[in-house]
Image (tube, rainbow, N blue to C red):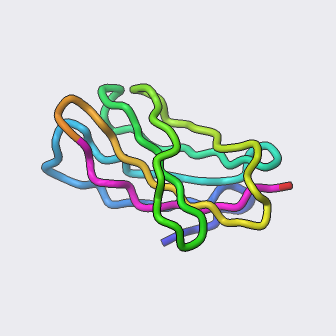
Amino acid sequence: MLQRHGATPYTLRVPRLKNLCAATALVLLTAGPAAAGSLTLTWTDNTKGTATTEIERRVGKESFKKIAEVAPGTSRYVDGPNLRLDLEYCYRTRSRSSNGLSPYSGESCGRPKP
């Protein structure tokens, strides 16, 4: 369930998954306003810096598309600065290691601020 914490980003809590490959699922993903026309994504990396993170985005009813893959140990990504202010952007992530891919995180959505 999405929760709004005051003026902070929207937060989606995802249950911790068990018995995964070494690419452990990310368990918290948030998407919230950053600089104008941008959204900042943050997450908890349970891989202890041993896996990259794939970031996918969708707009409206579109399918998710991979927009980035960040280095091991990274837990923040800024999407923008040219996001449209009238659209809601939804994101999901997963970890990639030599042992394979984790399941996707839950999705988290947000709108950029002007």
Residue 7 percent coordinates (x, y): 74, 58
Q: Is residue 42 magenta?
A: no
Residue drawn at (39%, 38%), measured in percent from left and top? 45
Q: Which residues are magenta?
A: 101-113
Residue drawn at (41%, 61%), measured in percent from left and top? 106
- Majority secondary structure of the magenta segment? loop
Residue drawn at (44%, 26%), measured in percent from left and top? 71
Q: Is residue 24 left or right of residue 42?
A: left
Q: How many marks?
A: 0
Q: Nearer the viewer, residue 110 or 69?
A: 69
Extreme residue in the right direction: 114
Residue 95 percent coordinates (x, y): 33, 40
Residue 84, image quadrant: bottom right
Residue 16 percent coordinates (x, y): 29, 55
- Image quadrant where one finds the C terminus: bottom right
Q: Is residue 78 left or right of residue 70?
A: right
Q: Is residue 104 magenta?
A: yes
Q: Nearer the viewer, residue 87 or 47?
A: 87
Q: Is residue 9 left or right of residue 43?
A: right
Residue drawn at (47%, 53%), measured in percent from left and top? 65
When the figure is inspected, residue 51 is found, relative to residue 104, above or below; the finding is: above
Extreme residue in the left direction: 19
When the figure is inspected, residue 99 is found, relative to residue 66, above or below; the finding is: above
